[in-house]
Image: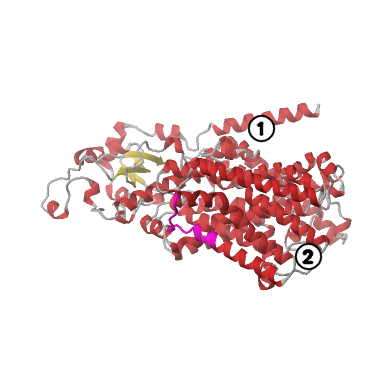
Amino acid sequence: MKMVRWEFVTLLIVGVLRVSSSESLYDENLYESVLDNVTCQRHLEEMQYFQFFDASGRIPQSITLGGQGSLGNYRQCLSIAQQVPNDTIIGKYCMIRVPLQQSSFNPPAFDPAANLGLNGTLFELINMSENDTQVQNGFHLKRAVGVMMGHENFKDMPASQNSLEVKVAVCLPRSCTTYLAFGQYTDMLNVSYSDLYCRLPGDKIFSTADYIAVITILILGTLTGLSTIYDLYNVFLLEKAPAAINKLLTSFSVFTNTRRLFTFSKTPGSIDCLDGLRSLSILWVVIGHSFSNMFNGTTINMLDAFVWAFSSKATWLISAVLAVDTFFMMSGLLVVYTTVKKMTPMSLMKNIHLFYLHRLLRMFPLLAAVVLFQASLLQHCADGPGWPILATSIQNCRHWWWSTLLHVQNYVNLTEICLSHTWYLSVDTQLHLLSPLVLFWILRGRRSAWIGLTSGLVASIICTTTYTYIKNYPGVSLLGTGFEISIMLDYFKYYYINTLTRSPPFVVGMVFGYLLHIWRESPRRMPKWFLAAGWVAALAFGSGIVYCNNPAAKFTQFWSNFLNSFMRGLWAMAVGWIVFACAAGYGGPINWFLSLTMWKFLARISYALYLIHYPIQSIVRGQSDVPVMFSLTNLFYLFYTDISLSLMVAIALCVLVDAPFSTLQKILLQAKTKPAAHPPSKGVSSSIEVLVNN
């Protein structure tokens, strides 16, 4: 009977969200209903043009530096309500796409025309003979990044990827189409253009997903309010000790959850250096996305950003992709380190469902909350001229939310991922689901453990190497693949987010997790020559792999295949040695730095920060009223904004969502799970996640 009820609820939710996924983000009926040719002609005759002209875009700035367009004044245009006899002319903001490579260009005849060079194509007009190829490549890169980051739909991209274009905002009466407003002038000049989108005041639709989000917030808000009142009443009026208060009834208490979030204690067996490593890695990820998101907005000097990104100066930023492999290594390390002493092979097999369930339930609440936000309220939290670039990612979440929650999106909908950065969670979950194939042998004893670990590592390397040499990818990073969109997307879909190619660092982490277990069981002093060799090797491998991500470095196909096969595993070995040496007491100043208390808080909220930072970046970029000027200084300003806002929202998510459901999970699973099946709630964050904290 219970199964029937759950199936009914599941089908109901799926049905509701399927309806939501088919709903438009904007009121198309509103756009159509205001159009009227007769009214438009009358408005064009009666209107005062300057207001509309003033709110429109001009010739885009710095076209020769890859300037992508002119945004005009979005809010000024939509605020226009010009009074004319017997009517009011309301402003409409439209964005048009103008190809620079026009077939011909016929300006009106006037004397300065010859001196200004107003002849031939627009491409010749702006005299881009030196920069045309680089700007062309920059547009290719921007389009590819837009698809990978979920802001452009690969299916809707222009058939020809070889045309340069600029986007220009125009403000016109809402009764007019762009062609009725100024088509006669573009025809006269023989300039072609296409409409991208138009915006009107109040054009956003409140969808089914929004209703679901509001209801969810009301339910959580009610539970949070009641739980907090109950908690405060017991603590301050009845003066009860926290241990004497019902944990179920205080699970949603803001007071208790905030106190726990900011309380740090030393736990025996914890690996403190992981806090610093996790914090630095998540900061590296955020600043990397801060840069990549600059390509999704309107950048005045895209060529400068493009040239810098392909120079040696950008190596530290482009190498941020290695932070993902660091997380894979730590995840593999923890799954062994926190499990090997608490389970036997038979208990693992008997409790395999709980092993998986614990992983999925710990990830689910925060992930579901951010997915719901992305699919619903994100659309209403801000607005701006670049806001429609979010439409694709929002629609992706409405349609493919289930593949994100089931962690299959890196195979089912590769170019339409909801929360594009969460491909990592899908790959990490899939590796975790496969980890018992090695864990079973580790739990049988030391000899079988080394056989299992060696077999797993060799198998992952052989499979990855074979796959890489078959595919023959041209580079060792996204920028190394060149400028063909098809090649870049093929690399992203079939190598970058592939579970197979990401398995070596995870298995390397499992090896170091077992080494830490052996050292924990029988610590022994290591020879100085061995420690020196370990640190030299880690430094050499780490710095070498960072250099291999140097965008200016050129590799032959053989070396590209070699690095794509072994680079991630070697990086995991370098980072794994740092963790092992620090945990064993041989880390010196590195261990001191990575174990500082200041890292503990950031590490504790790292999962929430990881999930929410990308939607926050999209909001910041989407509501910007002016184009972005790329410079390293501006990049850091954007990063400071991104990380500050993301931290505030991440704290709220941890207190209001993660902590309550973590407590409920422990209460519900406590009776079904033997103590040996789960790690302690403090110390090492979790038995199987490095971003998820108990």
Q: Amino acid at mark 1?
A: Ile
Q: Residue 535, can we see it? A: yes
Give whichever of discs 2 and 1 has the lower sequence position.
1
Left-right relation of 282 to 252? left
Q: Which residue is mark 2?
A: 265
Q: Nearer the viewer, residue 221 or 69?
A: 69
Q: Quadrant of the N terminus?
A: top right
Q: Which residues are magenta?
A: 544-556
302 drawn magenta: no
Task: Say how many tags the image has.
Answer: 2
Q: Residue 300, can we see it? A: no
Q: Where residue 274 sits: x, y (%)? A: 69, 61
545 drawn magenta: yes
Residue count near mark 2 (Cα–Cα under 10 Å), binned few <14, some 14–19, many ≥20: few
Q: Where residue 160 sits: x, y (%)? A: 35, 38
Dominant secondary structure, magenta:
loop
Q: Which residue is mark 1?
A: 13
